[in-house]
Image (cartoon, helix red, strand yellow):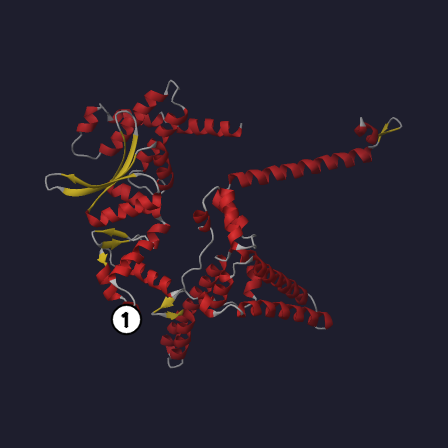
């Protein structure tokens, strides 16, 4: 009724008012659609991406940031701390930093001529590029400075400056630095649009004053406070030694240490330190997963399953995934893998065969564990990818569609398909004959996949 009163005047339609009202309605609808689209985009984002996006705008005390992460993600304090990036390891060449090496190479270049000089110049340029990328990575690791990267670059930063920024944990100091970075940015924009004069000088003074304020704060942070503690340097040295020499003993590690560390340690103290860095002790020999494996753990697990593992289903249609290893190195690898994955069941020192050689197994029995494992490893599997996908289909049937008429017949088909994939290249076809698995039936079984149907039903139910 109110709307009619707005658009009708003296029994005539007010076209201008009608047009304005329609435009307002269209604008409101557009804003609503945009909000819904942005909400859908956020809902579809990976939770880690959302967290990292949120993190870069948190400039208060680091302890409070970690508490907020813990509360938001419903995880413990230790796990929440993992979201706070560490500074990348400084690039070193024969115990020298990149700037020191570049300086030496430039002195050497002065004595060279022709193509040799050009090659040296190319080498120097590559080193400078690598150092520049390292600086960018270091700046990325300081989450509260990510939105202000361009302003930070105006400070002509080096690694020492990055370390000092990373060292700042209190919100008050962080806020002062951010305020000065913003002032620098504004002054730089202002002076770029002005001709030389009083306003230009004012912008320059503002820029230099803000820059000076930041450097004064950084100057108060001593170089000693940003250096790694001696204990941490030693632990890094121990980890590197074990990664380079798997199966090394604490006595041998002690003998390989530099003299300054050799004098202040014993094999016994080294053993205690190795526990802290989570090295695996197998009969006095130490093993540890390298950073390369830890960062790409599921790729290595997939490789292990492909080469020395299995993905199968027993006669009761229960899914099974496992890996087998022998020797002390395999035992240590499985111990560490179980520790990293936090799923699975470890069986060590099982005697198999006539020679009584010990065998170690890391098996996954529960549907939850197997689902978690396959979700992460299937993209990396090569030889057993098909079996992995079939197990995923079987688990979905068991969890959400077990009462359907087609569920049990389909599970039987999946069982036969997995048997076929595992035994089709074997010289002895006993397993295939045992369950009457014929090659001509395999194509039909593959066409009967319920994977797409179940995913569609699952999507609809989530939307509802």
Q: Residue furthest bottom?
A: 111
Q: Is residue 178 left or right of residue 282?
A: right
Q: Is residue 458 above or below residue 66?
A: above
Q: Residue at x 58, y 39 (%)?
A: 39
Does residue 444 appear in this view? no
Of residues 390 and 328, the one nearer the viewer is 328
Q: Residue furthest top?
A: 405
Q: Residue at x 22, y 32 (%)?
A: 423
Q: Residue at x 82, y 31 (%)?
A: 6
Q: Is residue 433 above or below residue 129?
A: above
- Looking at the picture, how far across and down is residue 108, in whole percent? 38, 78
- Looking at the picture, how far across and down is residue 274, in whole percent? 30, 56
Residue hosting label 1: 259
Q: Quadrant of residue 5?
A: top right
Q: Residue at x 34, y 35 (%)?
A: 370
Q: Is residue 300 above or below residue 456?
A: below
Q: Is residue 176 left or right of residue 108?
A: right
Q: Residue furthest left?
A: 354
- Looking at the picture, how far across and down is residue 43, in whole percent? 53, 38
């Amino acid at each position: 009724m109110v709307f009619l009163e707005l658009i009708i005047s003296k029994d005539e339609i007010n076209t201008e008012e009608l047009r304005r009202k329609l435009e307002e309605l269209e604008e409101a609808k557009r804003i609503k659609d945009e909000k819904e689209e942005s909400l859908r985009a956020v809902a579809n984002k990976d939770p880690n991406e959302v967290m990292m996006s949120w993190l870069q705008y948190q400039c208060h005390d680091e302890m409070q940031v970690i508490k907020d992460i813990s509360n938001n993600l419903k995880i413990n304090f230790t796990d929440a701390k993992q979201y706070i990036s560490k500074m990348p390891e400084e690039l070193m060449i024969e115990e020298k930093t990149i700037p020191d090496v570049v300086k030496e190479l430039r002195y050497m270049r002065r004595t060279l001529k022709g193509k040799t000089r050009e090659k040296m110049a190319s080498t120097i340029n590559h080193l400078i590029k690598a150092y520049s990328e390292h600086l960018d990575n270091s700046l990325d690791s300081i989450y509260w400075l990510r939105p202000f990267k361009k302003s930070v670059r105006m400070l002509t930063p080096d690694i020492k400056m990055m370390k000092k920024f990373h060292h700042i944990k209190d919100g008050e100091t962080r806020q002062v630095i951010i305020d000065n970075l913003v002032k620098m940015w504004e002054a730089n924009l202002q002076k770029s649009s002005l001709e030389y004069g009083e306003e230009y000088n004012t912008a320059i003074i503002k820029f230099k004053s803000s820059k000076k304020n930041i450097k004064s704060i950084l100057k108060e942070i001593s170089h000693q406070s940003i250096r790694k503690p001696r204990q941490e340097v030693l632990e890094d040295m121990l980890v590197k030694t074990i990664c380079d020499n798997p199966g090394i003993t604490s006595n041998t590690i002690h003998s390989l240490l530099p003299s300054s560390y050799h004098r202040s340690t014993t094999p016994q103290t080294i053993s205690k330190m190795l526990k802290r860095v989570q090295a695996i002790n197998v009969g006095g020999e130490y093993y540890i997963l390298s950073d390369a494996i830890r960062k790409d753990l599921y790729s290595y697990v997939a490789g292990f399953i492909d080469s020395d593992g299995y993905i199968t289903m027993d006669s009761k249609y229960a899914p099974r995934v496992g890996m087998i290893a022998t020797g002390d190195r395999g035992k240590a690898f499985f111990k560490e893998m179980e520790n990293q994955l936090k799923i699975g069941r470890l069986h060590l020192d099982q005697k198999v065969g006539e020679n009584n050689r010990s065998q170690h197994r890391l098996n996954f029995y529960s549907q939850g564990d197997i689902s978690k494992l396959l979700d992460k490893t299937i993209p990396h599997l090569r030889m057993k990818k098909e079996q992995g996908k079939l197990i995923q289909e079987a688990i979905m049937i068991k969890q959400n569609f077990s009462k359907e008429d087609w569920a049990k017949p389909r599970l039987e088909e999946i069982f036969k398909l997995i048997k076929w994939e595992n035994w089709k290249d074997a010289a002895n076809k006993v397993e295939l004959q045992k369950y009457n698995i014929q090659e001509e039936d395999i194509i039909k079984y593959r066409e009967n996949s319920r994977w797409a149907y179940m995913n569609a039903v699952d999507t609809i139910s989530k939307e509802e």
